[in-house]
Image (cartoon, rainbow, N blue to C red):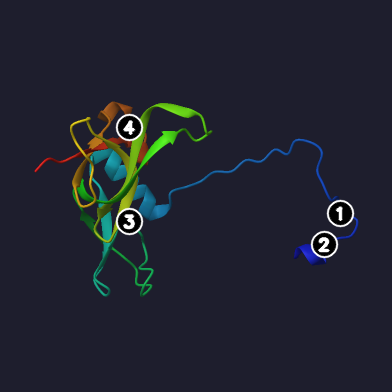
Amino acid sequence: MTYLEREPAAPKAWQDEMQVTNRYTYGVAGERFFRAIKDESKILGTRCNNCEHTYVPASLFCERCLDHLDEWIDVGTTGEIVTFTHLYVDYDGSPLLEPETIAFIKFGDGGIIHRIESNESQQIEIGMSARAVFKSKTERAGSILDILHFELMTS
């Protein structure tokens, strides 16, 4: 039913608390992708041999040709910085004590958005390599935050 087809007697506003619960699952590909990060300190992708495209994060179907993807590959833990930004405020708009750098790190034909850790003597540039630094195995929960940050690779 669309908004225009709405029941005329239906309430226009709800003035009470509404209990909403949900459960998000990673799905089959996401489960395997995050389990590899958690259990093996690996970043996995899936490869479409028809399109010659590597998906990171992994996917079960190629978005280009719709083939089922069943070739899983370890793309390594070092990727290329494609773009980055410096953050000076937190999610709620309050100033950060120390600025953070967030980057899109390319793996295969996809990539991961994550924090970059660097010291003041390192200047981040597009095209630099960055390597994943994982939390200790006992601290991992099966999420992208099991990667603590990425560190810049020096030449």
Amino acid type at circle 3 is Ala
Name the image quarter holding residue 103. Answer: top left
Determine which of the numbered discs, if any, sits on residue 6 in the image. 2
Instruction: Name the residue nearer the viewer: 13 or 38.
Output: 13
Kindly indicate whether the residue at mark 3 contacts the one at mark 4 (C-beta within 8 angstroms). Answer: no
Kindly indicate whether the residue at mark 3 contacts the one at mark 2 (C-beta within 8 angstroms). Answer: no
SS at mark 1 in the image: loop
Residue that mark 1 sits on? 10
Q: Which badge, 2 or 3, is on the more N-terminal residue?
A: 2
Q: Residue at x 28, y 60 (%)?
A: 46
Task: Give the CA distance from mark 1 to mark 2.
Answer: 7 Å
SS at mark 3 in the image: loop
Task: Give the CA distance from mark 2 to mark 4.
Answer: 47 Å
Q: Nearer the viewer, mark 2 or mark 4?
A: 2
Q: Residues within 10 Å of mark 4 (few under 14, many from 20)?
A: some
The x, y position of residue 140, in whole percent, is 32, 32
Q: Residues within 10 Å of mark 2 (few under 14, many from 20)?
A: few
Q: Residues within 10 Å of mark 3 (few under 14, many from 20)?
A: many
Task: Give the CA distance from mark 1 to mark 4.
Answer: 47 Å
> In screen coordinates, is 53 left or right of 62?
left
Amino acid type at circle 2 is Arg
Residue that mark 4 sits on? 140
Kindly indicate whether the residue at mark 2 contacts the one at mark 1 (C-beta within 8 angstroms). Answer: yes
